[in-house]
Image: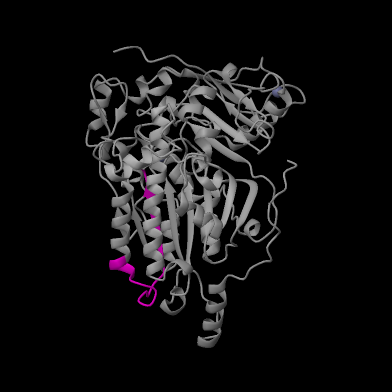
Amino acid sequence: MNDQARTTLPAPRLLRPWLLLVATGLAAACGGSQKDGEADPETSAKKPNVILITLDTVRADYLTCYGATTGSTPAIDGLASEGTIFERAVSSSGLTPASHATILTGKFQYNHGVRVLSADSGFKLEDEHETLATKFKEAGYRTAAVHSAFPVSATFGFDRGFDHFDSFTASLEAKPGRDKVSWDVQTFQRRSDETTERTVSWLDEAVGDAAQQDQPFFLWIHYWDPHDPVKLPPGDSWGPLMNSPELKDIADRQTREYAGEVRWQDQNIGTLLTALRTKGLLDNTVMAVTADHGQGLEDGMELHRWSNHRMLYREQVHVPLILRGPGVPAGQRLTDQVRTADVAPTLLDLAGISPIDGRIDGESLVPRIEGQSGGDLWAYGEQINGYDFNAGMWKHRPDATFLFMVTDGEWKLIYKPSMPNMSELFHVGIDPKEVRNVIGEHPEQVERLLANLSERNPWVTEPFPMTEMSSEADGGKSDILISLGYSAADKGTGNWWWTCPRHTEVHSDKRQRCPEEGCDRILIPMVQWEEPAPK
Ligand SMILES: [Zn+2]
Ligand SMILES: [Zn+2]
């Protein structure tokens, strides 16, 4: 890319202020070093608090700091101007639990294993994976989560490591006559005013103000409003928003209400920031604001025939990423492509805590924040809609049965093994809105990006199996699913085979390297996909 890596002058390397305090304190106390996980209240109290805010379903371009024209979002814009904003952050999925698992672990789906919302397995973050919560808890932090909807709950394994977990318990049910397994969206969500109120109550009770604070905290707040219009803001806020000059003329109702809910949510984030400021907590708090995915809306419908999520176009995967607090320079805008997988490594780094164990896909963005340009990072994304009981959509959009995305920031491939001829290549360096599919014109790019996908081996070539754990945990619910025609085995009759991106005449029944003379490429999967027979 010829883009300048940054639009402000490189900042000098900053010494994180708390580091100095810790170092001085330790030298005075014992002169020794202290290992992670053996937090001493004296020193850990000086570590920064960390707040992670995930905005469900919020596209970057609906925030003013990312160029929105739908009215201002002053609270988030304020965080951006007091901190560092990443202009090109990419999420790993258009699906809430899968994407949140990436944010919390720094891993992509083929590594953390949360790939669907509902199936016999493949929806839960297993205990072997460390998360931001388990890491901060180990390091002596008080940990809390306050949520606004069911898809980030304990059902998906996100409760581990939290002292306080204010979430939802719902069940996924197959209703006769519906084409998918779903949860009760009416009941199991709350508005951002209530979420903020509950968060501030927790701060009052568990933390107090800066003078009273005896332990640093890690707090994850999940907001939901723009996901759907089920719980609209109260009339005295909603009326003026809908009648504001920026919104009143938007003809598409979904888009108008979406923009209104983003602004309403921002007002409540403003309330939260005021509370943190009043308590004197804001200055010693690292804040990260990001989203799990975006939403198609009116332009997504026009460009890509899709107004919702569960896809991997820019409308779904270009998300905000803003950092503010100790160690983060103010007023900086970075243009390198980064991933939501980088959030966890970055927050741990900013707090001086050791990285998550095992194979991590993300990396700390601290060197970039401190002035080193690293260039664009490869981003990955997927949708395993065809094996997700909650995804009815692939029946009207069969090309979206399975989607695998990879982008180096200049080119982006969406590979569709169930309908390979519908795969898409965008030259995002010159076509950021992904208007023109140029897959027929650049076979060398297709091959290069497919090779990157193959190396990752992200493929899911059969339904998620029933495990001992899942059959126990669902209390026989799967029997109901099977009787309604939702058993994994009945879901489609995918018949997968493998081929070489260069030698398409090669057919293999397993993943291996191309047997053609002088060709070493790893084969890619293709599938003959048929809809399940009606019951
Ligand atoms: Zn979501
Ligand atoms: Zn070959």
Whether residue 357 is visible to the viewer of this picture, yes or no, is no
Quadrant containing the C terminus in the rendered view: top left
**Quarter of the figure with residue 95:** top left
Residue 108, x across and y down, in percent: 52, 42
Quadrant containing the N terminus in the rendered view: top right
Query: Can you say whether 443 is above or below 324 in the image?
Result: above
Q: Magenta span covers which residues? A: 204-224
Query: Can you say whether 438 is above or below 368 in the image?
Result: above
At x 44%, y 38%, the residue is 245
Q: In front here: 82 or 391?
A: 82
Query: Can you say whether 304 is above or below 146 in the image?
Result: above
Q: Is residue 425 left or right of residue 52?
A: right
Q: Is residue 183 left or right of residue 140?
A: left
At x 43%, y 48%, the residue is 54
Q: In this view, does 436 lie to the left or right of 222?
A: right
At x 53%, y 87%, the residue is 28
Residue 211, x across and y down, in percent: 38, 77
**Quarter of the figure with residue 480:** top left
**Quarter of the figure with residue 134:** bottom left
Q: In front here: 73 or 519?
A: 73
Whether residue 249 is visible to the viewer of this picture, yes or no, is yes
Specify whether residue 152 is painted magenta.
no
Q: Residue furthest right?
A: 518
Task: Answer with the quadrant where ligand 1 appears in the image.
Answer: top left
At x 37%, y 15%, the residue is 532
Residue 491, x across and y down, in percent: 37, 21
Q: In front here: 456 or 56?
A: 56
Q: Which residue lies furthest to the top in this view?
A: 534
